[in-house]
Structures are given as C-alpha cells and as structure tokens.
Amino acid sequence: MTNPPAVIHLHRDQAASLVRLLRELERFLEECGETVEAAMATHFGLDPASEAFSAAFSLHADTIESALGTENTTSRTPT
C-alpha cells in the first residue's frame, strides 16, 4: 500500500523565495561552462546533467508560481 503524498505548507514569502532560488540555479546551470558540466555528469551519472537539473528547476518553479497565482515572467519552459 502506498501512502498519499504529504502536504507541506509554506508561507507565500517562503514559496516566492524558493521560486527565486530555483530560477537562480536554473540560470547558473544554463550558463555554466564545460568544466562544471563535466563534473556534474561524472558526479550524477547524467549527461548532460546541467540541462536535466535546469529543466527540473524550471518545472518546479513554474508549478510553485502557478500555485501562488503569480505571473511567470522568467520561465524558460515552453508553454
């Protein structure tokens, strides 16, 4: 039997801060050089690791922004 997912409550300010952090990490990974990309690929066993993580950060940031009802002006996820 599987347990239903836990509900986590965040204050709006905390959720908005999390979105900003995810967007900053997304931008960093998209701008990282080959050395960082190679290190991430080796460490995580994903190639290209930075693209996979960048996409995940973007997806989660979009989801939180949608739940907050805020305008999504920095998303790089195609709609």
Image: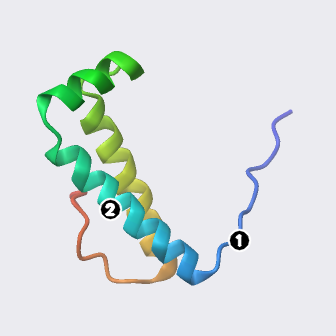
Residue 6 lies in what quarter of the image?
bottom right
The type of residue carrying mark 2 is Arg
The type of residue carrying mark 1 is His
Quadrant for the C terminus in the image:
bottom left
Density class for disc 1 (Cα within 10 Å; few <14, some 14-19, many ≥20) is few
- For label 1, the residue is 9
Residue at 24% x, 76% y is 73
Q: Viewer-proximal residue, 55 or 50?
A: 50
Marks 1 and 2, Cα distance to the nearest angstrom? 21 Å
Density class for disc 2 (Cα within 10 Å; few <14, some 14-19, many ≥20) is many
Residue 3 vs 15, above or below: the answer is above
Q: Can you tell which of label 1 and label 2 is closer to the viewer? A: 2
Name the element at disc 2: helix
Residue 40 lies in what quarter of the image?
top left
Name the element at disc 1: loop
Residue 13 at x, y percent in the picture: 54, 82
Can you tell which mark lies on residue 23? 2
Residue 18 vs 2, above or below: the answer is below
Give the left or right position of residue 20, taking residue 78 as reference.
Answer: right
Residue 67 at x, y percent in the picture: 51, 74
Residue at 44% x, 74% y is 66
Give the left or right position of residue 25, taking residue 30 as reference.
Answer: right
Residue 43 at x, y percent in the picture: 39, 20
Give the left or right position of residue 60, taking residue 35 as reference.
Answer: right
Q: Viewer-proximal residue, 72 or 23?
A: 23
Give the mark nearer the N terminus: 1 vs 2: 1
Residue at 71% x, 71% y is 9
